[in-house]
Image (spheres, helix red, strand yellow):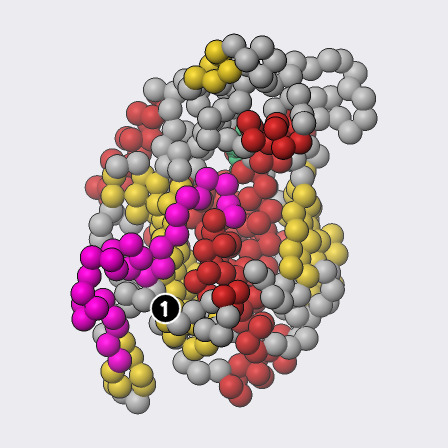
Amino acid sequence: MLKKISYMTAGESHGKGLIGIIEGIPAGLQLTEEYIAVDLLRRMQGHGRGKRMQIEKDFAEIFSGVRHEHTLGSPISLIIKNLDWVNWEDRMAVGKPKKEHKKVTMPRPGHADLAGMMKYDFDDIRNVLERSSARETAMRVAIGAICRKLLNEVGITIGSRVYQIHDVVDNKEVDHSLTMSQLNDLADKSSVRCLNKDAEEKMINVIDQAKSNGDSVGGSFEVIAKGMPYGLGSYINADGKLQARISQAMMSVNAFKGVEVGAGFASSAAFGSELHDEILFENDKITRSRNNAGGIEGGMSNAQPIHVKVSMKPISTLIKPLRSIDLNTMEPKLAHKERTDSCAVPAASIIGESMLAIVLADALLEKFGGDSIKQLKKHIESSGKY
Ligand code: EPS
């Protein structure tokens, strides 16, 4: 559903690394590897992460598309090396392995294992799980960071926070006066990216409990974008609607199970008079009485902050596995288990920020266009409405 930007990632979880290419970023955007590294590091954090994150030091090398710290307008390609590769060289060898490796044959309920085996005629679940692993999201975050840099350049900023882990919910709304960098500073200080100290402690406890039971927990997070102009997206056709584009991007991430824009599902129980955001004119500016629409009306940004909530299911690799079968014999067996995270919701919120950045950068370029950042800024200055 992207219109101006296209991107692709490649790489297996325990292969040599991840590769990403993004095309459509205008020339002249100031960009460094160090800038991208900030979000990559944020994605690696969080209470409940497993041992893999202690092995990796995710860093995206810019392989092409940038010269002297500025984008060239050409495809930007990135490489993130897997430091764990040294432990998997033979099992994941491109050529013939030196020795035989035990095949994985007990599919995990909830993972891509079973349907992936059927789809590709594999006899080893490893052929499925290596690519279906959420490891791939590291590259999405690197690509998202490039889009975030573009957005920041024109005053659009993105932040997030976790408001639910398992059954622990932080019901307090985000303070509307916070800038997105203030929001991220506060959330990043918490190991579960929660803004409320009481809820934070309970979230940490529920993760620890799940971990000690060999179990996993999911949760929900909110992503916000500020500095939005009117009119990103469109009401004209199905594929132009901004909320559809955001939902597609979010639902393309492993384990993300639901998306709400603004008041979302709660809208069903509200009267129209309670729900819709009244239009006011104050201090020479059109303002709104509230933001239940989450910054999107009629498929377009309405110059209010964009609010998106996303739910993530518990990770499906369990240390205390569920019932499954051995696909060799069809006999009952417990599901395959391997190293895993008991909770990855804090990391998921960074991935959510990145996906929103990709969609908004794309919609911004669709509306205002430009081959260079200079041109884009000129177009926004001359026709952008806020
Ligand atoms: C992940 C890397 C993976 C997992 C996790 C996400 O590393 P490994 O499989 O070597 O432990 O920690 O992926 C999953 C839980 C999954 O089910 O795919 C990462 O880089 O985020």
Q: Nearer the viewer, residue 277 or 60?
A: 277
Question: What residue is rendered at 58% in x and 72% in y?
Answer: 365
Q: Nearer the viewer, residue 112 or 358?
A: 112
Residue 274 x/y as whole percent: 18, 67
- The secondary element bearing badge 1 is classed as loop
Residue 136 x/y as whole percent: 59, 41
User: Does residue 291 appear to the left or right of 184 in the view shown?
Assistant: left
Residue 219 x/y as whole percent: 35, 41
**Rendering quarter of residue 328:** top right
**Rendering quarter of residue 105:** top right
Label 1 CB sits under 8 Å from any ligand 1 atom: no
Query: Is residue 130 at all visible to an observer of this figure?
Result: no
**Rendering quarter of residue 100:** top right
Let me know if residue 255 is in the magenta part: yes
Question: What residue is rendered at 32% in x and 61% in y?
Answer: 262
User: Does residue 229 appear to the left or right of 133 in the view shown?
Assistant: left
**Residue at image mark 1:** 295
User: Does residue 123 appear to the left or right of 181 in the view shown?
Assistant: right
Question: What residue is rendered at 44% in x and 23% in y?
Answer: 318
State which region is magenta: 252-279
- Number of residue marks: 1
Residue type beneath disc 1? Gly
Q: Quadrant of the N terminus?
A: bottom right
Q: Quadrant of the C terminus?
A: bottom left
Let me know if residue 135 is in the magenta part: no
Relative to 319, is 290 above or below? Answer: below
